Amino acid sequence: MAPIRVLFFTTHLGGGGAEMQAVRVANQLDPAAFEVHVAVCRRGGAYERLLRPTVRLHHLAPARIRSSTAGLVLGAWPLRRLARALAPDVVCSFMDGANVVAALAVGRRGDRPRVVACVQNTISQELGTSRHPVKRTVRALIQRTYPRVDRIVALSRGVAADLIDNVPDTAAHVSVIYNAGLDDQLAARAAQPLDDDAPAIPRPLVVACGRLAHQKGYPHLLDAFVRVRRETGAHLWILGEGPDRAAIEAQIARLGLGDAVRLLGFRKNPYPYMAAADLFVLPSLYEGFGNVVVEAMAVGTPVVASDCPHGPGEIITDGVNGLLVPPAAPAPLAAAMIRVLGDPALARALAERGQARAQDFHVDKIGAAYAALLRGVTTGTSLDTPPAFT
């Protein structure tokens, strides 16, 4: 039997959990059973180098997904040309903008490839009722295109429920497959030294990792950290870049945390920083899943996370393999961080049980779930793909 030809599509391979998920799934599919291609709109993403040699990468630049309905439609043309040239059995896209473009590119031809759209965040939180023209355009096109794709993969049960609430016509073809939070390369990458420009490691050290944007809840973390610093002497490193950097720097100065908090920017390999930490914290206001929670667990670091919609509460059992606190609540967040930093036995127990829990999200298991779904979509034998695990 000929291998199933799969074309993965997203805007850019770098900077976020959705892009890493695309890379991990593409790498995991058995080359004997799948011929794997990856297409991106913008070249040069940090994760491109992680693709296995058996995966062929296609750059669609200078085409861009633009901030209007016309721009999104025009952005579909390069992907349509590539799909016609490759004749894939399945186009599998990641993130809402890319999902819309994939649906528009493939169209309604009877001989078209199947389309699998991977939804990586909650529509209600990410798009909501925003008047921003990009978000309004994407939300309107989601309503139009998602009901007609062949399968939708939601990365958590919460994201699936949110999608169905917002686009009821998708209910019959939504599957839940959690993100692959680790692979066989993660341990080796975590064992690498910190970057040459990294500061000396202070103790105790708290690390957070994520885009400097409203979603990630950093103002609440900084408010909490005033007390954490006062009671434990801890230092905080935040990995990531984004539009809120200036506001976060101003808050750090206003709170008198300049000697304790470092913004280290985007790091191609964040895992040595996670492994060096005494505590990893996720203060997000909302998530689709929270890859960094699993990654921090996998390298043996205890985790405190906000129990935000959605993801962390499906990864962590509070008090067993991590601690959960309400989102946007600095006082409980500070108390949980102080508790872990002040109790070495608790920290060790959370780290050990967290490391065991992380194995449930290994790419072997998640990749097998994707492979089964892609086979089912292609052959039409089964579209009832269960969650990767319970």
Image (cartoon, rainbow, N blue to C red):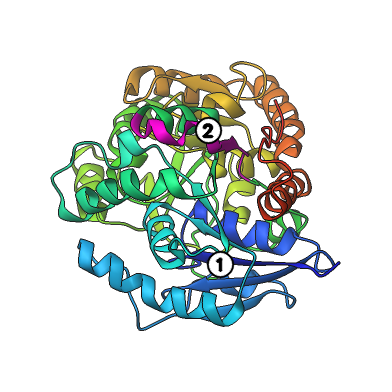
Give, as a single range, the part of the protein colored magenta.
Answer: 166-179
2 or 1: tag closer to the N-terminus: 2
Residue 217 in view (yes/no): no
Q: Position of residue 229 (x, y in %)?
A: 39, 32
Residue at x 46%, y 23% (from the top left corner) = 307
Task: Read off the residue under disc 2.
Answer: 172
Q: Is residue 173 magenta?
A: yes
Q: Secondary structure at mark 1?
A: loop
Q: Looking at the picture, tell me which residue is in the foreground, 251 or 147.
A: 147
The numbered disc on residue 327 is: none
In the image, is 345 to the left or to the right of 253? Answer: right
Residue at x 39%, y 37% (from the top left corner) = 122
Q: Looking at the picture, tell me which residue is in the foreground, 310 or 227.
A: 310
Relative to 250, residue 315 above or below? above
Q: Amino acid at mark 2?
A: Ala
Residue 235 in view (yes/no): yes
Q: Quadrant of the N terminus?
A: bottom right
In the image, is 201 to the left or to the right of 243? Answer: right
Relative to 116, residue 291 above or below? above
Residue reaching furthest to the front? 110
Q: Quadrant of the C terminus?
A: top right
Q: Position of residue 163 (x, y in %)?
A: 41, 34
Q: Nearer the viewer, mark 2 or mark 1?
A: 2
Task: Read off the residue under disc 1.
Answer: 195
